[in-house]
Amino acid sequence: MTHSQRTFDLACLRLLHLADSALPIGALAHSFGLESLADAGLLAPATVPDLLRGYIEEAGVMESVFCRAALRLAEEFSAERWIEINQRLDARKPGRESRAGSAALGNNLLSLALAVGESRVLKEALLAAREAKSPVHHSPAFGLVAGTLGIDEDRSALAYLHQSLAGLVSACQRLLPIGQTEAARTLWNLKPAIIAAAERSRTQGIDEVCCFTPLLDWGAMEHPALATRLFIS
């Protein structure tokens, strides 16, 4: 095996590690509005696949665009552009709890990546966000970390979307009577939708991409009013 092949294989393994839904960044504590929908009777096992497909087709494309934009900063980092990417994404998240959840995951991911491996770019990114008091959202953080590993945009976008969807499927399992087999089937069947969303994100930029997920946005906004809460968001 050549040195370049070993380097590529190592980067791929690290990407798999970062895309693991069990990565200790707090993802399991967030439902991003799903808990409110389940509480209101608007989410049932039979409707989960369609809801998650809609999420990927809307929010998935948007998050992929921001993931790609941040990844491009890995070669020539610009603190100004980094802050702009995160603040533009922040403005596209109307639900306060989902917005805060995304920012918590992004900050935790950057901190974890720095804890397991030294990176000047990631250190500058975390410092710039703190100095500007700017959020660090999950998808840009994922893209920037993947970029420092030398992973290309398409693989990074696919990995981000897959782990995000896996997290939502896991949340549905804890909220609804969905077994392991059905959860695996749901995630398996949605992989083509993940690919389609990643492909659509290639041709859009952070200035024009948009997202329309009113039901999930309402769920996020309603979450603080729930009498009993299993998730932070």
Image (cartoon, rainbow, N blue to C red):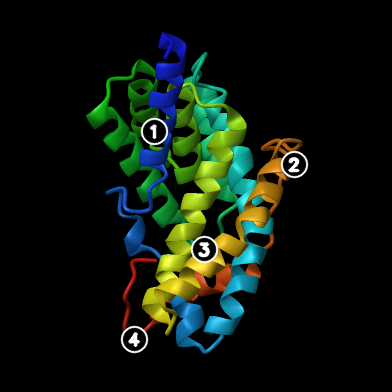
Q: Amino acid at mark 3?
A: Gly
**Mark 2 falls on what kind of element?**
loop
Which residue: 31% across, 83% down?
A: 228
Mark 3 burial class by Cα count in 10 Å: few <14, some 14-19, many 20+: many
**Left or right of 48 in this view: 178:** left
Q: Earlier in the sequence, mark 2 or mark 4?
A: 2
Q: Amino acid at mark 2?
A: Glu
Residue 143 lies, with reference to residue 36, above or below; the image says above
Whole-number angstrom distance, CA of label 1 to CA of label 2: 33 Å
Question: In this figure, which residue is indicated by the disc labeled 1?
Answer: 13
Q: Residue furthest top?
A: 3
Whole-number angstrom distance, CA of label 4 to CA of label 1: 42 Å
Which residue: 32% across, 78% down?
A: 229
Which residue: 42% across, 14% down?
A: 1
**Left or right of 196 in this view: 7:** left
Question: In this figure, which residue is indicated by the disc labeled 3?
Answer: 95
Q: Residue 161, how many percent across, how many down?
A: 55, 49
Residue 145 lies, with reference to residue 47, above or below; the image says above
Whole-number angstrom distance, CA of label 2 to CA of label 4: 38 Å
